[in-house]
Amino acid sequence: MKASKTFRKTAIALAAVAILLTIASCAHVTPIEECVNDEPYGFWFGLWHGVIAPFSFVISLFSDDVAMYGVNNNGGWYDFGFVLGAGILFGGGGRNAKRRP
C-alpha cells in the first residue's frame, strides 16, 4: 500500500515537471544580436557582476534596463568569475565546514 502511494507521488511530480518544461519551452527568447554592441564581458566583469548580483536583482525587479547577468559574455570565464564573485559576497561554502578533532 505504501509503495503505491510513493509511486503515485512520483508520477505526479514527474508529470508536473514535464508540464512545466513544456510551458517553459514556449518562452520568448531575445535575439543575442540586439545585446551585442561592444566586446564580450570576460572574467573580471563576471567577477564584478557576481559581487553586485543581489543588488542587481533587486533593481531589476523595478527596472527593465538592469539585468543580473551579462548576456554579451565570453562563456566559461565569465561564468567562473560570476560564480566566484557571488561566492565572495556570500562567504563561499568554507564558512560552514568544520574540522573534526
Image: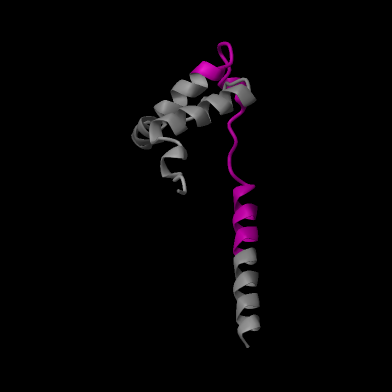
User: Residue drawn 61% across and 59% down?
Assistant: 17
Residue, x 57% and y 28% (percent of image)? 79
Q: Residue at x 65, y 71 (%)?
A: 11
- Asked if residue 22 is positioned above or below residue 28 in the image, the reply reads below
Q: Quadrant of residue 77?
A: top right
Residue 72 at x, y percent in the picture: 57, 21
Q: Is residue 31 left or right of residue 88?
A: right
**Position of residue 97 in the picture relative to residue 74 (left or right):** left
Residue 4 or residue 98, whichever sits in front = 98
Nearer to us in this view, 94 or 44: 94
The colour mode here is: one colour
- Whether residue 38 is in magenta: the answer is yes
Q: Is residue 38 above or below residue 13?
A: above
- Name the spot of residue 49 as percent of width and height, x first: 45, 25
Q: Name the residue at 51% across, 17% down.
A: 44
Viewer-nearest residue: 38 or 83:
83
Query: Is residue 9 in view?
Result: yes
Q: Which residues are magenta?
A: 16-44
The correct choice, above or below, for 81 with respect to 24 in the image is: above
The quarter of the picture where residue 76 lies is: top right
Q: How many marks?
A: 0
Q: Is residue 85 magenta?
A: no
Above or below residue 90? Residue 97 is below
Q: How far from the left and from the top, in percent, is residue 30?
A: 58, 31
| Residue 67 showing in the rendered view | no
